[in-house]
Image (spheres, rainbow, N blue to C red):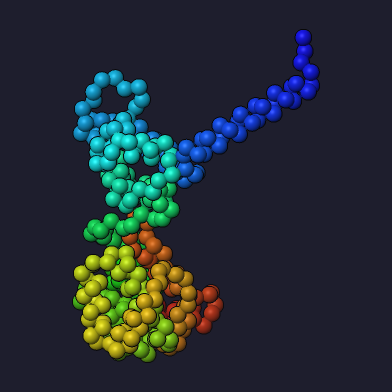
């Protein structure tokens, strides 16, 4: 016996109603998409760690690979119930200390830790205070290969960490300076040559202060940064006045005008880009359009350096 069309339509409506009810109950029990993504992320990461790798005994047979929820909670120092709710996608907001404990327990690298923070708190992970990595041979080789394009590497407080010969010819021979004075903020405020070298010295100097402000936010208690700020404040009235504006600035793209003692005035486009795997190391390059007077000045400068 076949069912009537009206009966089939009625059954379809009931099925849609049951589906909507199930979906509503599911949403009510769990958080939004970020919470569900967080839950899935945590489950996949604990599945890849064997108990022995975490220093735990492998007790009995396991129905699934990796750590149990209770073991992750133990390693992170949080309650099993709290961790279970995270893996269920409940709409909760873990503290930074909890997220960092989970990152250590699950052996996250920097990218995974940052992803964890973005899923759980909709913000990037705060920096881990550690010694910055040295400038690698590949980065130094890059500086040499792109010469005669002036280029150097800075950290957040504007220490010049590495440079090529053309950068030394354009700005200043950093190799002749003591390491503590290879700093662009120091050059801007404490070296008399900077005020004529930078055509718009005030803008350059204020940008340097804004970048130092950003550096203090990333690593608030860094003693070298605090020492530099204290020395600049002691030596420069302009620094003291502009520091109180609390402007901030990160790596950027723009244009600078120079009045060079050898080749005269030239305007160059600069690009600052963060180096992967570092907190604040950035490579800075200066270029000019082909055939422009500025490029001709760079060519003369390259020839003059020998």
Which residue is at the far top?
Answer: 1
- Compared across the picture, whether 86 is left or right of 291 comes to left
Residue at 28% x, 38% y: name it: 79
- Place of residue 174 in the rendered image (x, y in percent of width and height, measured from the top left): 27, 76
Q: Position of residue 47 (x, y in %)?
A: 35, 32
Residue 77, position as x, y percentages in the image = 24, 41
Residue found at x 49% / y 44%: 32
Q: Is residue 70 above or below residue 287?
A: above
Is residue 33 positioned above or below 268 on the image? above
On the question of residue 143 being in view, the answer is no
Q: Going 28% across and 61% down the picture, which residue do you hit?
A: 135
In the image shown, does 55 or 159 lie closer to the viewer? 55
Q: Position of residue 279 (x, y in %)?
A: 33, 60
Q: Nearer the viewer, residue 8 or 73?
A: 8
Q: Is residue 267 left or right of residue 209?
A: right
- Rendering quarter of residue 183: bottom left
Residue 1: quadrant of the picture? top right
- How many marks do you count on the picture? 0
């Amino acid at each position: 016996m076949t069912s009537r069309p009206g009966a089939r339509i009625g059954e379809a409506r009931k099925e849609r109603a049951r589906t909507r009810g199930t979906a509503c109950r599911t949403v009510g029990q769990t958080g939004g998409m970020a919470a569900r993504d967080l839950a899935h992320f945590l489950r996949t990461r604990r599945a890849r760690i064997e108990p022995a790798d975490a220093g735990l005994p492998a007790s009995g047979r396991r129905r699934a690979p990796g750590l149990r929820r209770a073991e992750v909670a133990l390693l992170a120092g949080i309650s099993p119930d709290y961790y279970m709710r995270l893996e269920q996608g409940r709409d909760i907001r873990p503290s930074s200390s909890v997220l960092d404990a989970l990152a250590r327990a699950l052996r996250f690298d920097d990218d995974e830790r940052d992803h964890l923070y973005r899923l759980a708190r909709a913000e990037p992970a705060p920096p881990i205070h550690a010694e910055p990595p040295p400038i690698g041979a590949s980065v130094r080789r890059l500086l040499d290969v792109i010469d005669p394009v002036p280029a150097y590497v800075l950290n957040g407080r504007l220490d010049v960490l590495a440079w090529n010969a053309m950068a030394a010819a354009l700005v200043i021979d950093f190799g002749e300076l003591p390491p503590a004075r290879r700093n662009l903020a120091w050059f801007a405020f404490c070296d008399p040559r900077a005020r004529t070298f930078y055509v718009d010295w005030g803008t350059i100097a204020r940008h340097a202060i804004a970048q130092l402000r950003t550096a203090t936010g990333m690593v608030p208690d860094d003693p070298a940064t605090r020492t530099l700020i204290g020395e600049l404040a002691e030596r420069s009235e302009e620094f003291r006045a502009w520091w109180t504006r609390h402007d901030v600035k990160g790596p950027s793209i723009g244009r600078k005008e120079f009045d060079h003692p050898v080749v005269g005035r030239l305007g160059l486009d600069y690009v600052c880009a963060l180096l992967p795997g570092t907190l604040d190391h950035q490579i800075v390059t200066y270029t000019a359009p082909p055939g422009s007077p500025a490029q001709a000045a760079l060519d003369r400068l390259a020839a003059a350096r020998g």
